[in-house]
């Protein structure tokens, strides 16, 4: 949720990333709730933190 909200509200200035130690499925209720405030995360997916091991965060 936080990744979608931050990218929606401040995507021109920041880029949020979200990951965990295990991939899961995004809860469909989360997608539904965010759509109520015009934030579409339906194309988002659960990511493992290892996907960002070479990312240089500033």
Image: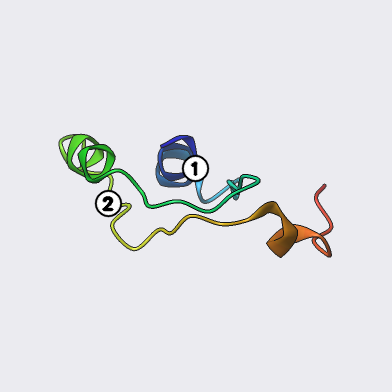
Residue nearest the viewer, comparing 27 with 7: 27
In the picture, measured across the screen, residue 29 lies left or right of residue 17, that is: left
Q: Position of residue 23 (x, y in %)?
A: 53, 53
Residue nearest the viewer, comparing 54 with 7: 54
Q: Position of residue 56 (x, y in %)?
A: 84, 57
Residue shown at 48% from the left, 38% from the top: 6
Q: Position of residue 43 (x, y in %)?
A: 34, 63
**Residue tagged 1:** 3
Image quarter (top left, top right, bottom left or bottom right) of the N terminus: top left
- Number of numbered labels in the structure image: 2
- Marks 1 and 2 in Cβ contact (< 8 Å): no
- At mark 2, the secondary structure is loop
Q: CA distance from mark 1 to mark 2?
A: 11 Å
Colour basis:
rainbow
Residue shown at 58% from the left, 46% from the top: 18
Q: Position of residue 51 (x, y in %)?
A: 69, 63
In the picture, measured across the screen, residue 39 lies left or right of residue 57, that is: left
Residue shown at 59% from the left, 49% from the top: 22
- At mark 1, the secondary structure is helix
First reached walking from the N terminus: tag 1 or tag 2: 1
- Crowding around mark 2 (Cα neighbors within 10 Å: few <14, some 14 to 19, many 20+) is some
Q: Which quadrant holds residue 39? A: top left
The dot on residue 40 is: 2
Position above or below: 33 against 47: above
Q: Which quadrant holds residue 5? A: top left
- Crowding around mark 1 (Cα neighbors within 10 Å: few <14, some 14 to 19, many 20+) is some
């Amino acid at each position: 949720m936080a990744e979608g909200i931050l990218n929606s509200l401040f995507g021109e200035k920041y880029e949020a990333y979200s990951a965990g130690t295990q991939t899961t499925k995004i809860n469909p209720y989360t997608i539904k709730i965010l759509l109520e405030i015009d934030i579409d995360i339906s194309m988002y997916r659960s990511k493992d933190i290892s996907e960002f091991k070479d990312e240089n965060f500033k």
